[in-house]
Image (tube, rainbow, N blue to C red):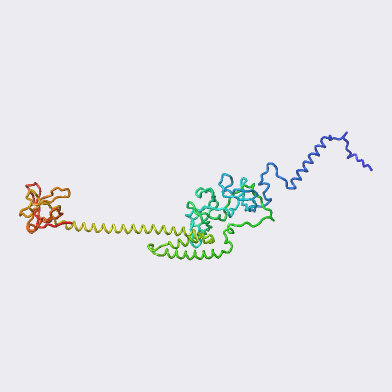
């Protein structure tokens, strides 16, 4: 049966649309169908689209869990290759993405990473050498790198306040402690290596607290060495309570070294390494204190000696005041060489050998043997009078005293 409808009959002869237009419409429709098919099947993104746009979770908000889809993917201290590297991530590693910027994803610092903090802002207890207590306010924590010195690690991850606690990782360098990244510490990874996990793929990520948690039950060796370690700590504290002169840490230090060298000691070995450094500081302080004590004693002895000498000099000066003249006693060739002849004259010379004055014994001094005093330092008790023959002075002495 034929169905004729004029309203819908098409004739190439009298149609308003040429045949070539019909062909173009068919081609466009085919292309649209192909594009729609690709879009629906999750095909590759358009040429200008970024990988991060393709991988971005639909309506998921930060933070979200993601998987690393590259090999040897660098973590960096900031959003760009101009920031220093802070280790690597590998295909299959899980991360928590907290934000993004300019094609870079900000991730929670993984347990395999580390940070630096100034030693001046940390207090450490020997009873728990892996825990540090913040002693100041506004203390910066900086992203750590095996290739960058702590003093040059300038990317601040988080700021801590007084009373906050951090986990020490047992390494010191350039007055900085190496610590596990605290809560809030982040690093950056190129977004092209990040793949958000679907809801059924998400698994809980270990937090910083989880990574710092106590591991499996300690082995018997580790338990034994921990007990030894705490016993040594008590000895150290008891030693510190003694007077400085009695303190000696040699035995305790050797015992700590033995624990630190034991490969099966676990935490006890790490604790012992830290305690050794503390004991060495005590020994250094002890050495300084002893040196100060010795210097103080020497200064005291020198002061005592000065006081004695001063007192002796003052006594000597007071006693010397009774002498008319003091100097070396010599015979006078001008008045004869025989000191036993009555009226014999002597002379007193100074340290340079010059004659100070002449002297003549009188009264009791004239009756003693003065030859024994020739060349000796003496003091003469008597009177001084002018001596015209020498244009000098003459001391008539009644007493002569040898001076030491």
Quarter the N terminus occupies: top right
Taking depth in this image into account, of 401 and 330 the one nearest to the observer is 330
Viewed as shown, does residue 362 lie left or right of 86?
left
Give residue 404's quadrant in the image: bottom left
Outermost residue on the right side: it is 1
The percent position of residue 261, horizontal first and vertical second, equals 50, 59
The percent position of residue 7, horizontal first and vertical second, equals 89, 39
Viewed as shown, does residue 364 lie left or right of 204?
left
Give residue 313's quadrant in the image: bottom left
Outermost residue on the top side: it is 13
The percent position of residue 314, horizontal first and vertical second, equals 21, 57
Taking depth in this image into account, of 282 and 344 the one nearest to the observer is 344
Taking depth in this image into account, of 154 and 360 the one nearest to the observer is 360
Report how many numbered discs are placed on residues in the image.
0
Determine the residue positioned at 66% across, 44% down. 50
Viewed as shown, does residue 105 lie left or right of 258?
right
Determine the residue positioned at 48% across, 66% down. 231
The percent position of residue 141, horizontal first and vertical second, equals 53, 53
Determine the residue positioned at 58% across, 52% down. 186
């Amino acid at each position: 049966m034929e169905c004729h409808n004029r309203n819908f009959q098409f004739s190439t002869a009298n149609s308003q649309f040429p045949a070539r237009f019909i062909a173009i419409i068919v081609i466009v429709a085919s292309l649209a169908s192909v594009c729609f098919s690709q879009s629906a099947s999750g095909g590759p993104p358009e040429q200008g689209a970024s990988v991060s746009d393709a991988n971005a979770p639909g309506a998921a908000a930060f933070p979200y869990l993601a998987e690393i889809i590259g090999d040897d993917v660098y973590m960096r201290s900031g959003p760009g290759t101009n920031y220093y590297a802070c280790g690597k991530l590998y295909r299959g590693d899980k991360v928590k993405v907290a934000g993004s910027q300019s094609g870079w994803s900000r991730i929670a610092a993984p347990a395999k990473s580390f940070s630096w903090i100034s030693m001046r802002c940390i207090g450490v207890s020997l009873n728990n050498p892996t825990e540090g207590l913040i002693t100041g306010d506004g203390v910066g924590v900086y992203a750590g790198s095996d290739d960058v010195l702590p003093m040059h690690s300038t990317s601040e991850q988080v700021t801590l306040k007084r009373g906050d606690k951090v986990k020490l990782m047992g390494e010191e360098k350039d007055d900085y402690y190496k610590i596990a990244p605290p809560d809030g510490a982040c690093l950056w990874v190129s977004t092209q290596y990040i793949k958000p996990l679907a809801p059924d793929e998400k698994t809980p990520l270990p937090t910083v607290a989880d990574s710092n948690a106590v591991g499996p039950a300690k082995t018997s060796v580790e338990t034994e060495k921990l007990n030894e370690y705490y016993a040594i700590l008590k000895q150290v504290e008891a030693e510190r309570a003694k007077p400085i002169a009695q303190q000696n840490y040699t035995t305790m230090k050797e015992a700590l070294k033995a624990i630190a060298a034991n490969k099966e000691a676990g935490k006890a070995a790490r604790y012992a390494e830290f305690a050794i450094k503390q004991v060495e500081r005590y020994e250094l302080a002890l050495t300084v204190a002893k040196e100060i004590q010795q210097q103080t004693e020497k200064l005291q002895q020198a002061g005592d000696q000065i006081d004695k000498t001063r007192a002796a000099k003052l006594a000597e000066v007071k006693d010397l005041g009774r002498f008319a003249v003091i100097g070396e006693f010599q015979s006078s060739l001008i008045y004869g060489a025989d000191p036993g002849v009555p009226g014999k004259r002597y002379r007193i010379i100074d340290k340079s050998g010059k004659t100070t004055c002449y002297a003549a014994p009188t009264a009791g001094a004239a009756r003693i043997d003065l030859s024994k005093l020739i060349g000796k330092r003496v003091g003469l008790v008597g009177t001084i009078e002018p001596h015209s023959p020498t244009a000098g002075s003459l001391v008539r002495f009644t007493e002569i005293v040898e001076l030491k």
